[in-house]
Image (cartoon, helix red, strand yellow):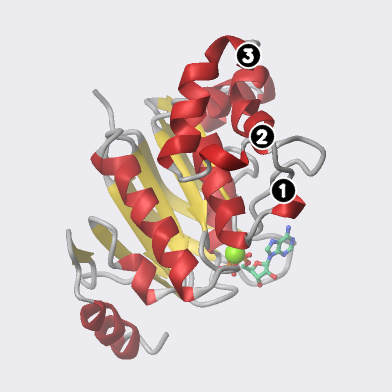
Amino acid sequence: MPAILNVDGLFKVHQEGSAPVLKDVSFTVEHGEFVCVMGPSGSGKSTLLHLVSGLDQPSGGRVQLAGRMLHELSDRERTLLRREKVAHVFQFFNLLPNLTVFENVGLPLAIAGERPENHEAKLRGLLDRVGLASKSKSYPHQLSGGEMQRTSIARALAGDQPLLLADEPTGNLSQRAGLEVMQLLRTVREVDGRALLLVTHNPRDATFADRVLFLVDGELARGRTITGPNIPVEHVHAALTELRI
Ligand SMILES: Nc1ncnc2c1ncn2[C@@H]1O[C@H](COP(=O)(O)OP(=O)(O)O)[C@@H](O)[C@H]1O
Ligand SMILES: [Mg+2]
């Protein structure tokens, strides 16, 4: 089976004449692996995730998702592949404000043409798992930040995609709520056996990964990968200091 994700020599310039954001980025995420890419603000982490999911196109290099080369697909094929293979968790949650927690979590099923009502047991199980069984009828504005992010993790799980992309998932949360979110994200790998690609500048969050890569000046720092599990946060801090991030 091919890796769930392989990126090779990714190069990205947003605007002609401007400096490239990504210069030569190559790495692989195996099925069921939790990989973290760390880099400071503005280093191209969100850009990288957009390229990985085919929402944006690289200026050079290739992305292979679930064995398919994204550049060989039509826009329609890329959209369908993304829906089938990739779930997202964002810094600002991206919940739909007019839908309840239950309806937000059921959204991937609705998008796949299913009726969420027919999957009530599954959706209730997911809400229970993220500690929101009692909030299923609430609306996003009635939730705390941590509850909103846990709703979005349940939503990410509802679609059964093999790869979850998380962009600064604790960036808008308290220390404690962020820790709960990271513990839940770890279960996505441990319990569900799905792969995660986390991009963050939070050293604590990186400690949950199986492998941490550092994005510096548009490239992944060679020979500075940290492997887990159970990475001591001091190791992450030491790498950041050494790389002057
Ligand atoms: N759509 C875009 N058009 C032009 N410049 C962009 C665009 N998206 C991001 N950038 C620029 O690319 C750089 C990297 O941005 P981003 O990928 O958001 O970094 P990060 O997520 O690590 O903070 C920044 O300088 C940002 O201003
Ligand atoms: Mg970003």
Q: Can residue 180 be spotted in the picture?
A: yes
Which label is found at residue 163? none
Dot 2 alpha-carbon crowd within 10 angstroms: few under 14, some 14 to 19, many 20 or more: many
Residue occupying the point 36% across, 59% down: 36
Density class for disc 3 (Cα within 10 Å; few <14, some 14-19, many ≥20) is: some
* Residue 140: image tag: 1
Badge 1 crowding class, 10 Å Cα cut-off, few under 14, some 14 to 19, many 20 or more, is many
According to the picture, the residue beneath numbered tag 3 turns out to be 117
Q: Regarding mark 3 in the picture, which secondary structure is present there?
A: helix
Task: Determine whether 96 is above or below 48 in the image.
Answer: above
Indicate the position of residue 188 as horizontal and vertical percent values: 34, 41
Q: Are marks 1 and 2 in contact (CB under 8 Å)?
A: yes
| Three-letter amino acid code of the residue under disc 3 | Glu
- Amino acid type, label 1: Pro
Q: Inspect the image, locate mark 2, and give the three-letter code of the amino acid beneath it.
A: Asn
**Relative to 241, does residue 57 appear above or below in the rendering?**
above
Q: CA distance from mark 3 to mark 1?
A: 20 Å
